Image: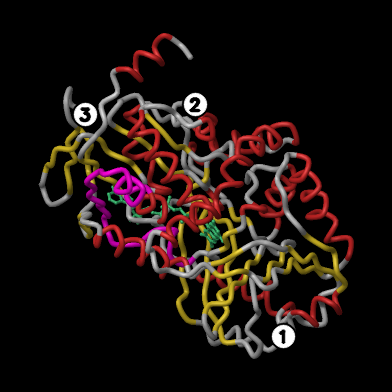
Amino acid sequence: MTAAGSFAQSTHVVPDKVAVVGAGMVGLATAWFLQERGIEVTVIDREGVAAGASWGNAGWLTPGLATPLPEPAVLKYGVRAVLSPSSPVYVPPTASPRLLSFLTRFARNSTAGRWKTAMDALVPINRQALTAFDFLGKAGVEAETYEAKSFLAAYRTVEERSVLLEEIEQIHAAGQDIEFEPITGDDAREIEPSLSDEIGAAIRLHGQRFINPGAYVQVLADSVVARGGRLRTGVAVNDVVDGIRDVRVVTSDGVSESYDAVVLATGAWLGKLAREFGVRTVVQAGRGYSFSVPIAHVPAGPVYFPAQRVACTPLGDRLRVAGMMEFRKPDAKLDPRRIDAIVEAARPLLRDADLDARTFEWVGPRPCTPDGLPLIGATSSPRVFAAGGHGMWGITLGPITGQLLAEQMTTGRTPDELAPFSPLR
Ligand SMILES: Cc1cc2nc3c(=O)[nH]c(=O)nc-3n(C[C@H](O)[C@H](O)[C@H](O)COP(=O)(O)OP(=O)(O)OC[C@H]3O[C@@H](n4cnc5c(N)ncnc54)[C@H](O)[C@@H]3O)c2cc1C
């Protein structure tokens, strides 16, 4: 530890009163774990609970698959994106300089070597991700996490399947356990009659879970409030003003309130408030779409079509179908062409799903960083913290993020697991 590090520790002041900006999975989990350590919290969201990416996502709790987004295969999808409007990755033809800079950095990180370094950073928090959900459950957060009785990655051909099998080998080599078995298309259909005859090969994954993310995050919010937390919705945080002894949070209704510390958990909007606190990593919205449809045989667990990048999750008596990675501004309007692209990709692969009876068409911004790692921890101010940038995995990693960040904020020590995620990297 450096002299500066030990000085910071010895002078660390435990905050009594913390504002958390953003009522998504990450912000609310952080607020909850801060309360666990006796801290008074106020959660502020410009819209409401789960108004960003935390509502209509696929809800998979799959630490076994939580790998860095920049990977060698993504480069291939990038090229396809330019060629085909129905590709699962969309980059606008007139990308802004900021987006171009993000994509350039993202591409630079999409090498096997960088992937391995990022994976090494993720493995320690992935290992604890489900334990953090269990902790919440045992402490009375009454939202269910469902064991995936089956979890199938399904393909048309054995050749297509080899991409994920290779990736699983690399995941294993990085020290992350994931139990799986390759199976035939017929075996896959026996397990999940919802798969069509076009499926010729699959991988069955074990030990993963899923949730209804919007419902879960709402229960988490209710729990924060029941434990004495304050939830302010419908007001945006316009400014965070760092003082010598406190930090002031200025909201769009003109109110300015004083806190001992602030956590910025604003998902794909993180850069706006975090930049002035030394957070230079661009957080780019990788927008995903979803909708829900009736299906004759609701699967017993998630079904993934990796070649199409379409993720399906059973939610009650319907199937949520999610996909696309659209690099645009987080607040851009829903583009119905992306929904059509998901529908056309999924239609031949699902049996007896009524893809034309869609409800809850939704778009939400994955908060993506160019190196595929989240930003969790202190900023250039000792009173301002960041928690975001989890990209594809903010639901799975939200609770463990909150747990470890609350530890850092109250002890002044950075848990080893968080070291690679410094917002100042
Ligand atoms: C289609 C799709 C499928 C996905 N599937 C999965 C999955 O299966 N498993 C998984 O782990 N992850 C998945 N993800 C990723 C996951 O949804 C995100 O990583 C996660 O929701 C991010 O949570 P967050 O709390 O950081 O951000 P958000 O949920 O976006 O929350 C940020 C909040 O900040 C608020 N806010 C922004 N600016 C301000 C401001 N100035 N003042 C006040 N409030 C503000 C917003 O209103 C918003 O509510 C998926 C994402 C998509 C799009």
Of labels 2 and 3, earlier in sequence is: 3
- Magenta segment boundaries in residue numbering: 30-56
- Could you tell whether 218 is left or right of 257 in the image? right
Residue 182 drawn at (x, y percent): 85, 64
Residue 334 drawn at (x, y percent): 45, 66
- Amino acid carrying label 3: it is Asp
- Could you tell whether 179 is left or right of 16 in the image? right
- Amino acid carrying label 2: it is Arg
User: Which residue is tagged 2?
Assistant: 425
- Could you tell whether 314 is left or right of 37 in the image? right
- Amino acid carrying label 1: it is Arg
Q: Which label belongs to residue 297?
A: none
CB under 8 Å between callouts 2 and 1?
no
Q: Nearer the viewer, residue 264 or 187?
A: 187
Q: Which residue is at 70% across, 45% downward? A: 176
Is the image coloured rainbow, by chain, by secondary structure, or in one colour?
A: secondary structure
Residue 373 among magenta residues: no
Label 2 CB sits under 8 Å from any ligand 1 atom: no
In this rendering, is residue 150 above or below 379? below
Q: Nearer the viewer, residue 202 or 366?
A: 202
